[in-house]
Image (cartoon, rainbow, N blue to C red):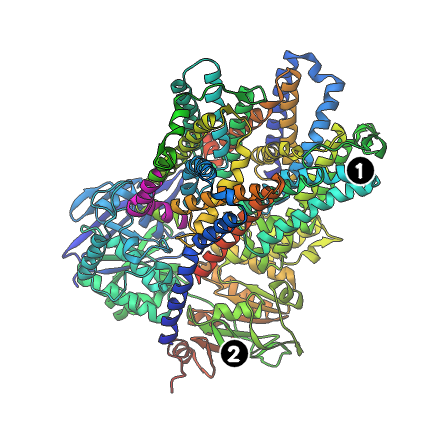
Amino acid sequence: MISNRLFIRLLAFAALVAVIAAIFWSQNPAFLSGGNIRALMRHMSVQGLAALGLTFVIVVRHFDLSFPGVASMGAMTLGWLIASGAPFPAAIAGALAVGLVFGLVNGIAVARFGLPDIVTTIATGGLAVGFSYFYSNGTSISQNFFMSGILDLNDKRIIGLDMPFAILMAAAGVAAVVLHASRVGAGMYATGQNRVSARFAGIATRRLIVLAFALCGTMACLAITLLVASSGAANVTAGGQLLMPAFAAVYLGAALFGRPSVGATLAGTLMMSTMLNGFTLLAIPYYYSDAIVSTVLIAAIAIFDPRLSGLLNFRKAAA
Amino acid sequence: MTSGTRTVLDMRGIEKRFGDVKALGHVDFDLDAGEIHALLGVNGAGKSTLIKILSGVYVKSGGTIAVGGVQHELGTPRAAIEAGIATVQQHPELVGDLTGAENIFLGHEGARPGLFGRIDRADIARRAEALLQRFPIQIDLSRRVADMPAVDREIVAILHALRLENTRILILDEPTSTLTEREKASLFSMMRMLRKAGIAIIYITHRLEEVYEIADRFTVFRGGQKVACHTVAEARGKAISIPVLMLGAGGGLTFPPRTGRSDGAVVLEAEGLSADGFANVSLTARKGEILGIFGLVGSGVDELSKALFGAIPSSGALRLEGRDVRFRSPAEALRAGIFLVPGDRRAEGLTLDENVIFNTVAANMSRASLGGLMRFGANRRAARELAQMVDLQPMRLDRDLRGFSGGNQQKVVIARGLYRQAKCYIFVEPTVGVDIGARSRIYALMREISKDAAVIVMSSDCDEVHGVADRTLALYKGRPIEGAADRDQLLHAGIMGGVAA
Amino acid sequence: MSALTADIPQRRRGADFLMRYAFFILVAVVFVAFAILRPTFVTPGNIHGMLMSASIAGLMFLGLTWLIAAGEIDVSFMSVAALANMVTAALVQDGQGWALASLGGLGAGVAFGLVNASLVAGLRLPALVITIATGALAASIAAAIGLGTSIALNNTGFVGQVLGLRVGVLPLIAVIVAGLYAVSWFVQERLTFGHYIYAMEQNRAAVVEAGVPVNRMLFMLFVLSGVVSSLAGVLLAANLSSGQPYLGTSYFLDGLTAVLLGGMALKLGKPNVLGTLAATIFLIGLLNGAALLGWTDSQRQIVRGSLLLVGVGLVVFARSRRKT
């Protein structure tokens, strides 16, 4: 019965994506061309990684609003390290470390010191933005990028997939195992639903919350690394464009599939990216993208809200 | 008090159906002015359905309701309040930072109602004074509710229900569940005072001894039907057994036979254990027997259980199988082999939005996983086996815990403990909110568990402790009292703090 | 025992008094320090500028204060201000008069206030995610109006004239905002509305059960937030002689900081209008003084972030003390 319900949800999701794709395709047949689908997958990669990280935090029933700022700082750290001649694996490690450190700070502030998550992460995000200006006084960094090999992260292909998408798939695979097939994930769901009972079951709730924030920060920096690799420069506002799509993907996915999960987040990301890609193809300017994402997000939350869908079912039953 | 003289409520042929399910079938119920009427029944017997109809939460499917001789439909909470029926929930909603008086008159602060009325604090104080004159009771209503003891909060909630002049019927839903014995006494004195003022009180409780203490009449529900209505005097005179009425023929609690052994290996030993809430408790739990600890709410039992489980810090000596131990967290206690079945299973024991398998294995992730990965197949098999053992009803492993009754939720907590394979099990209030049918099964399970492990049962139900345990101890105001030889002595020890001569 | 329990509130009352007014002492100390280090800080021109900025910011944060006090959140207020700012600027540039342009800007803000109110108060959807989304929508429309860049204005119309008016030495707008805050304080402290805001934060179910139309109150609060934010946006169009699509970002941290830090003043961790006003003046003065001392944008950004963290930490500390 459970799997039956899941099947119906999957079917509904596939139908929704098909309808959206069909609409774009009818407006511009290039939408379903190989080149565009590859572009779509690239776009998904950056957004998907950030959204996956956020998924962990949402599962433990917290919020993280710092990851865009943290990602900006990660981008500038990456750029600065490359510009100053560090080998690119070390530069990436540096960027990820920024995400990790901020994630740990958020997690400890929230889990250990009981600070409210929303305002605290807004503050740490603000701090991260401040720090990201230090490297170059706010100008973008692109020296040495060509030589360092970081661009390969964007250009290389692996087993027939573009590198960014391969990284997303690998990260999603790992995230799925962690969240859905490991004791860590089980502990996170238990923590999110009932903190006290999880603690009484011997689950290290605080540590798991810290871990969730750490993963969120780190994955946001991984996402920004791919973005920097594709644009060939690091700048201080890079992370800003991660916030909306990540929240939209997680909430859209959770709305579609009943609760936050890796699969739900990927589905949400696929849907957001399909739409954004389609609108880009129709030559709609960049500054509309947030408007599209936010409208979809509001609609998704409203339509899939259990009380509202319950109302719809009720009407159906009455009719 | 002769019944029928001043009937304030008369419900005739009340029915309630949910789809095809009949929750209440053709029930008559009446209430006299100035009486305390206890409403009894196991969970699902129909008493809360009746109350919800009366307070306007449910719309009745059939029947008539007359309040003070006038017919009422009572389709909404507002209609019920206007008819003079006020309900005090089991956990009344109060605002901690406001004073008692401000809570009582919340929503009616100004001379005129509305969002932009001027608050007249002097007037609120005057009205609170007037209310206390109508219902004289000792309480300082100018204190912040957050600073009040539980009983004062209960009284504030009752005064809130009575603030309207026309309130004639007061419904109290298990008001004593969080009160200490002394607080209960002052609540009861308030109820008697209200009775004198002519208020009719419907009193819902699971504690049968309270019926004899406070009620004038009682009505018993079973399976959606009213099965009996007697005055307490009648019940005393004819020696009517309320448990039999509640459960039908052959009812009554059955405790599993004791083993009579007390020579098992010592598992857990506490010496001079103290924490916030109790002091200097020494106890020994042996394999093969059940140690019972009787203590009322507020006596320190809850704190004692949490201290033994590492959930709150404590001082003193604790030995597990002869070795000194100190638990800094529940995780450490679990690892060492202690398992707690907490008193508030919904808040502390379960993950209600996860299924039976998840909840069964949650406290032993090391066993449920291999190299960090969950063993799905093995966990399902183990959960099924344990669910069969605890007799889970219905046997639906994929159903979320929210969909089970209180008794079956408790069985899942026990299954979780069994999966943990602990050396010492601590049960706190194991049968609160559990209907009598499931209780016997839970007692039998405790006895089975005690064959391989030490079991400690802590409860505010003296009969439960006395019935299930091999050895007993009472806790009174955080102080241990030993030496009670029988049930009455144990009760005396827990309520008065000494063993009767 | 009784002596002990009587003693604790006494001591606590002393500490409470200190906490209530410590913030004002801090403001005084910091401002005096700036005045000594950089005498230009207290020149009439600088004070006038600071009062102007503080008035507009204070206007913007008024609705937010009560929303947070009621246990809700609105992270769209600064984007709504940016949208109102851009709508006004675009209409002026288009040749419409300032009157119509201001109404247009206000209308946009009211519309967003209504959307937030309907979704959060009406449909009971989660406030944070909804206002993230509506904020992004407003910011996106603001950017789209200017095709991604700002709009320069060559006249500031009657709004500019109003901003230029003075009452004695004070800018008229500062007097008006001060008056607005005084009225708000009365509503918050003396009328049932304020009483219910704080009760709602603690136990919404209790307030609902008491028959208070809580959803209507929330609806009003979100609309209020939209109105005051857009009003600030319109004033900024004249104050900056331009429409700035991205002006929201700098107000975001400041707004939350002002509300939380201000909550420490007077009401021990509960956001309140006078606290917000004081904290707004403090923040504007601090950033202004820091600029005079030659601090860079990033340093000031870090000060903002740190102050917000301090504010949150203090609120949590004060609440945990009060609970025991």
| Amino acid on which the number 1 mark rests in the picture | Ile
Q: Position of residue B148 (x, y in %)?
A: 35, 63
Which SS does the magenta portion mostly show?
A: helix
Q: Residues within 10 Å of mark 2 (few under 14, many from 20)?
A: some
Residue C12 magenta-drawn? no
Q: Secondary structure at mark 1?
A: helix
| Amino acid on which the number 2 mark rests in the picture | Val
Residue C201 magenta-drawn? yes
Residue A41, picture quadrant:
top right
At 44% across and 22% down in the image, what residue appears?
Answer: C156
Residue at numbered disc 1? A82
Residue B206, picture quadrant:
bottom left
Residue placed most toward the observer, B90 or A65: A65
| Tag 2 and tag 1 share a subunit | no
- Residue range (magenta): C180-202
With respect to residue A223, does B348 lie above or below?
Answer: below
Q: Residues within 10 Å of mark 1 (few under 14, many from 20)?
A: many
Q: Is residue B391 visible?
A: no
Residue furthest bottom as drawn: B501
Residue A155, picture quadrant:
top right
Residue placed most toward the observer, B428 or A132: A132
Query: What's the chain of the residue with tag 1?
Result: A
Q: Is residue C154 visible?
A: yes
Residue furthest left as drawn: B5
Residue placed most toward the observer, A92 or C204: A92
Query: What's the chain of the residue with tag 2?
Result: B
Residue at numbered disc 2? B281
